[in-house]
Amino acid sequence: TRLRAGIAVDRAEAERFIDAYRNTHVTDFVICVTSRISTYPSKSRESLADKYLKKTENGRPVDYTSGVAAPAYDIFVRRGIDLYAVWIERLRSAGITPWISFRMNDCHCNADETHWLLTDFYHENRHLRRVVHRPPDGYFDRCYDYGRAEIRDYQLAYIAKTLERYDPYGIELDWQRELACFRPGGEHEGIAILTRFMGEVKRLAAAAAQRRGHGIRIAARVHADPGINLEWGFDPISWARAG
């Protein structure tokens, strides 16, 4: 497959993409590797490359060979290029700090019966969503419920595997995709749950830093208003105070 501009995505093109940022004011570069689906081939989560090969989803026939899944399959599988590893290496050579970002509860296209953003895990685990006591209504009802240990474990496993595979100098947890992370009424209880979760992320990052021989910072993308954060189950001030 080719980009819209008609450029083949080989290793040289991947390096040229990063080289465009050399000697600019860019100091940090953030690579988003996941929404609900992994953008790189992963053993702990369905990926875009898996979608490319998929023929049925949620009991329906599908064909993702002409969409976003096609370049992912072409780059990572057919060409054997680990795009993000190439980018991270090139960023370091350019003196730019590489980060990896995780969308923690992306809800795009969540009402669709099939979509390249949706996974079998999402379809098969409706009981792990925020709203299960009535039919879902609106955009956020189908978000995952972080009050469920299965969701926390699922996300931690992917973060751990990503830190094993890649060598960033920082990771970002994007909680703005989405702030709705607990069942309605479970947000206050969620404050302590997410604080413990962030502690687990810190331990994963610290272990990776020990293996890599350099620090790995953690950023959390949350609401700007501390009060609104607390209303949704987030206490980033406590996270920062705890290191």
Image: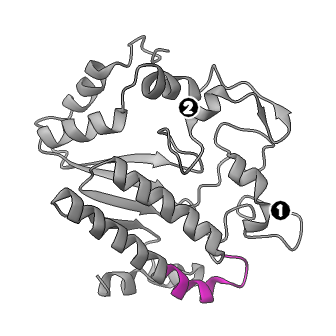
Would you say residue 54 sits in the magenta stretch? no
Point out which mark residue 49 bears: 2
Q: Looking at the picture, how far across and down is residue 238, in whole percent?
A: 38, 87
- Give, as a three-letter code, the residue at label 1: Asp
Q: Nearer the viewer, residue 157 or 215?
A: 157
Question: For residue 169, what is the image quadrant?
Answer: bottom left
Q: Looking at the picture, how far across and down is residue 16, in whole percent?
A: 24, 24
| 10 Å crowding of disc 1: few (<14), some (14-19), many (20+) | few
Is residue 79 shown to the viewer in this render? yes
| Residue displayed at 72% across by 85% down | 185
Do the residues bearing badges 2 and 1 touch, measured as CB atoms within 8 Å?
A: no
Alpha carbon of mark 2 to alpha carbon of mark 1: how far?
A: 31 Å
Q: Main secondary structure of the magenta part?
A: helix
> Start and end of the magenta stretch?
182-194
| Residue displayed at 58% across by 46% down | 37
Q: Secondary structure at mark 2?
A: helix
Q: Nearer the viewer, residue 160 or 224?
A: 160
Give the vertical position of 170 relative to 130 (above or below).
above
| Residue displayed at 50% across by 48% down | 34
Q: Looking at the picture, how far across and down is residue 21, in whole percent?
A: 20, 35
Quarter of the figure with the C terminus: bottom left
| 10 Å crowding of disc 2: few (<14), some (14-19), many (20+) | many
Point out which mark residue 137 bears: 1
Q: Nearer the viewer, residue 22 or 79?
A: 79
Give the vertical position of 104 relative to 33 (above or below).
below
Q: Residue furthest toward the top?
A: 6
Q: Secondary structure at mark 1?
A: loop
Question: For residue 3, what is the image quadrant?
Answer: top left
Q: Nearer the viewer, mark 2 or mark 1?
A: 2
